[in-house]
Image: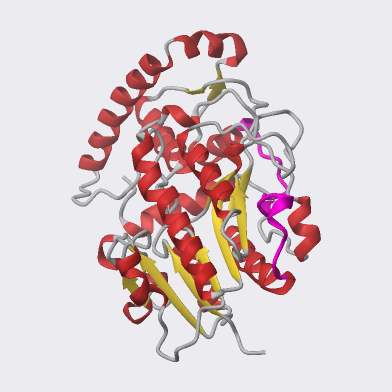
Amino acid sequence: MEKPAVLIVGGLGFIGRHLALYLHENDLASEVRLVDKVLPQLAWLAPEFAEACSKDKFVQADASREQHFPRIFDRANGKQFDYVINCGGESRHSQPDDVYEVRSYALSIALGKEIARRGIPAFIETSTAHVYKGGSTPRKETDKLVPWHKLADWKLKAAEELRKIPGLQYCAMRLPHVYGAYETGYFATGICLSAVHVDLQQDLTLLHTKDLKVNTLHVKDAASALFEAAKWLARVGPIDPQEGPVAFNVVDHNNTRQEHVANALTEVFGLKVTFVGSLASQLAKLNLDDVVDDMNEDSLQTWAELVEKAGITRPGPISPFLERDILKDQDMSIDGSKFEAETDWRPKYPNFGADSIREIVDSYKRMGWWP
């Protein structure tokens, strides 16, 4: 069989670039096109992405705008792409509603309509496990949906609207905290905070308890799962929208809790990590904005000094800045068995630990981001 032609929207983002690299290294596609609003020279691309994200594969465009569709979707051979994988949209937390509406929701809907019009057999989209009501038992795809924050809320709204588009073959991939080389989000914050507390010779104190679940997935596993989902959807064909939007949870086998993260940071940084526990967390919640503002003020000042001391003139996209939206006293715990049963996919990185943190820190050192 001929290899599929794959269009990756948000192709220079954290997951998008790793997906491009996965397809390139394993020679899985006949053609790969990366679409992003950001130019490659401004995307902090590491050298290993040079071929996978090369200029001849890249199109600078805003995929939420119809006038950009011909250069996004049209191929030289006149055929359609086989798979479209959307890794784009607003990834920052604590943004106003209109930012998510324009950059995430409108993007998904515009893509969905065009993909259905062109008869492309698989539209896969990255989503978040933060759409579920938290609970101590792992959430299944059919469990109650109560988005944690605006980012998750707009992802869910888009998924509900996409199911109404006639002929669209769509699947949302609900991912936990994705980590790996060059990550700039959840784990980057914790790693930078650790460096700050080592410099200050202070313990790192985490809100809530050691048992709080913060499930994880390696970015290379996220990339392979997205491709497997596209193959699966193209193979099974149309799914009745009355059965609800198709969604899969994807997660490693670690059942990661805050304790795992704390132990990994302790091993790598020689840092004592403590937990404030439930009661103190409840008190902190009453004035969480003040707590977060104080922490950010102290840590950003120290981080700036560390960066300056190290002679880093072009600081990378990492910092210890804490977003209030991710400091929830809710378990982020998901059950990924449905996806594994449907596709035979398994994570190559089933466990999260100290080596996971070392891999991230080493990637920052290679890029000259690490003080």
**Front one among 314 and 14:** 14
* Quarter the N terminus occupies: bottom right
The vertical placement of 187 against 218, above or below, is: above
Residue 322 image point, x, y percent: 40, 31
User: Residue at 41% of width from left, 55% of height from top?
Assistant: 107
| Residue 329 in which image quadrant | top right
Residue at figure coordinates x 60%, y 48% from the top left? 175
Q: In this view, does 348 lie above or below 211?
A: below
Is 52 colored magenta in this rendering? Answer: no
Q: Which colour scheme is used?
A: secondary structure
Determine which quarter of the picture holds residue 239. bottom right
Q: Is residue 320 visible?
A: no
Main secondary structure along the magenta-highlighted residues: loop
Above or below residue 187? Residue 347 is below
Residue 198 image position (x, y, % from top left): 40, 31
Q: Residue at x 40, y 28 (%)?
A: 197
Q: Look at 50% across and 61% down and name the residue there.
A: 112
State the residue in front, 14 or 115: 115
Q: In this view, does 158 lie to the left or right of 33?
A: right
Q: Say left or right for 279 vs 47.
A: right
User: Where residue 41 sits in the image (x, y, percent)?
Assistant: 26, 66
- Extent of the magenta region: 237-260
Classify the position of the C terminus by image quarter: top left
Viewer-proximal residue among 97 and 369: 97
Q: Nearer the viewer, residue 344 or 185?
A: 344
Q: For this view, does 329 lie left or right of residue 236?
A: left
User: Is 251 a magenta residue?
Assistant: yes
| View extreme (right): residue | 341
Q: Where is residue 347 in the image (x, y as percent from the top left)?
A: 69, 58
Can residue 340 be seen at all in this image of the molecule?
yes
Q: Residue 13 lies in what quarter of the image?
A: bottom left
